[in-house]
Image (cartoon, grey):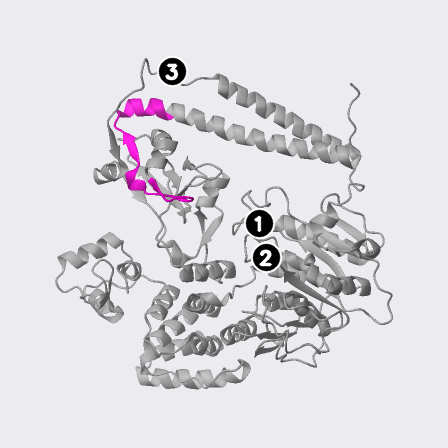
Amino acid sequence: MTAAEISRIAGVTRATVSNWRRRHDDFPAPSGGTDSSPLYDLEEVRAWLASRGQHTAATPSGELRTTLRLREQGGAGVSDLLVLVLAAARRPADDLAGLLALPDDDLVKQANDAAAGVAAVVPDTEPVRFTAADTTVLRALLLCVRDEGAQTALGVLAERELEDSAASGAYRTPAPLADLLARLVPGSPARVLDPACGSGTLLTAAAARGARELYGQDSLPVQARRAAVDLLLTAGEGAGVIVRTGDSLRADAFPELTVDAVLCNPPYGDRDWGHDDLAYDSRWAYGFPPRAESELAWVQHALAHLEPGGHAVLLLPPATASRSSGRRIRAELIRSGALRAVAALPPGAAIPLHIGLQVWILQRPEPTRPAYQTVLFVDTVDEQSAPGRGGTRSGSVDWARVTEQILSAWTAYAEDPDGFEAQAGVARAVSVVDLLDEVVDVTPARQVRASQADIDPQELAREATSAHEGLAAAVRTVAELAGTAAWDAAGASARDWRTATVSDLARGGALKVLRAVPVSPRAAGAEAGHAKAGADGEEHRPVLTGGDLAGGTGPTGQASDARAEQMPEIAEGDVLVRNLVGGTGPVARVAGEGEAGALLGAGVHLFRPDPARLDPWFLLGFLSSEANLAGASTGSSTLHLTPGRLRVPLLPLEEQQRYGAAFRHVEALREQARRTRDLAEETARLVSGGLTGGQLVPRPT
């Protein structure tokens, strides 16, 4: 274990651990690592702490997390431990306390017997064989289940498994999105299938809405097992849970099953989905999917498992709506009435965060009912969630707004498709005849905004007038700021002052330079998956990233408790500077109330001045100057900042404060200018759209 992990389990700072290492000869010697990053044996550290009366301060989940990382190679895998979580959850707390009190050999035997007792309900479980090498992790797991609950233990195991296999691309569907997809199925479906169930988030959402028969399949065994365990813990008494392992397209585990509803977030962009092996499969009722159209194979797989009239709700990438290779299948889905609605989500709703995914609502046609003559389109992407405006980061989605817009439109449309009234710029029902053109593009933005006929001229005129008035007020504010000079000419020549590098100032204690501990791509993928999972019992801290600085937003990132320990906390008055120099958007800011308490994320350097020696606004002005940044950056097309090379003038604090006031004024002017630019773009968009759409007319000259 690392020194940081020792500090966590002991409940002390890292500096205290460093002091222990220097001052106590009996402190455990490193058992691995390097001179700069030594590793210590967990049991030796615990024994040393106990000898000094220092009891562990780690939570049971924290102990489990540490133990999993340090467990011996060849010991129990996460899949085996998942089975034990289910077995432990079915026992009262007193029984778990009794197990924890057993000697190691008896504990191993009892754990094997308990796992064997539930193996029949967990998919593809080989006989569990815990050994004496597993006793530490077994005790940590049982303690976590007893004190913090089975769901917390599941979350820690999932976090570890995603870290071990981040390259698999296995990410949970965010809980608000899973709830939305489940609510889009009309009525109360009793039987629900997810053919790419992952860890079971969508089936859990279906169970919360009353589904009693839950079927799932996933190609990753550990995901299928976790889904089974999670569902068996949460679905409640009387619910039937059947989860299988395997590729649903190539090896359907439920070939004869038909259900009331299918919920699915399938893998995207998979060219190896079975195109060469499944050419004559009976599921392709709407056309054989091209190799690049795996998503349309999943769509037809879902329809094939529905009862007539049943609904399928799938989360798909936007290219599925417009790729030319899928035009014929889209046309058949529309012509038959199987495609009922397509809703566009803003970027950041789910992995991949930079893409605005789409929700497809489908219904298996009923033989006795005529095909529907319209398709509903809903577009929830607004100006704030469009790419480049901060909407591509996790946590930036307004789920209340998105859910209300999609649900209200779909509910009204499902009740009366022919009488649906369009919602300007948000929802519109488009006739089948209009959709079946040469491209058959079902992108919501194209369909919702293609016609201006539904927009009320009076409402648009009011919006344009309001935007124009806001713009005029912003222009006046810019003029006031621009007309108030906070500076004078230095004289006949520029001032010449002594400077010091940031490194020198840091060594002298005038400021501290902090940065989040970098993580490998593998660990970063695991963290993204864990943040997305929102593991039960674990809170996530807000994180300010380089993208937030460039976009002028507040903290939009998130970090799990484990990752948060490696990320400095931002305080009011800190100076934050982007690592990547250049591009658009602000380079730096002084942290205010909106940033205080957030964690420092990737791509940001934090400079914490001693207020008795350095003024933060003075520091901001000089650290972010173009010449200073250029001299302290390396690279060609992309410039990376070396913070220690930045230079700062050596001036008395009183003079620094005068400079700081001027820099604060300049930043206010710059921010107001950006706001004015945005208002100008919005006003121009409204007026131009109204003129070309026929809602507005130019005044006589």
Residue found at x 72% / y 44%: 425
Residue 125 painted magenta: no
Picture quadrant where residue 643 is located: top left
Q: Is residue 203 left or right of residue 393?
A: right
Asked if the residues shown at circle 1 and circle 2 are in contact, with their CB atoms under 8 angstroms apart, the answer is yes
x%, y% of residue 72?
A: 32, 75
Does residue 453 show up?
yes
Q: Badge 3 is on which residue?
A: 488
N-terminal of the pair, mark 2 or mark 3, is 2
Q: What element does badge 2 sit on?
A: helix
Residue found at x 38% / y 34%: 624
Q: CA distance from mark 3 to mark 1?
A: 45 Å
Picture quadrant where residue 570 is located: top left
Amino acid type at circle 2 is Pro
Please identify, in this view, whether the residue under mark 2 or under mark 3 is nearer the observer.
3
The disc at residue 592 is: none
N-terminal of the pair, mark 3 or mark 1, is 1
x%, y% of residue 386?
A: 60, 45
Picture quadrant where residue 508 is located: top left
Answer above or below: position of 569 versus 182: above
Asked if the residues shown at circle 2 and circle 3 are in contact, with their CB atoms under 8 angstroms apart, the answer is no
Q: Badge 1 is on which residue?
A: 397
Q: Nearer the viewer, residue 525 or 422?
A: 525
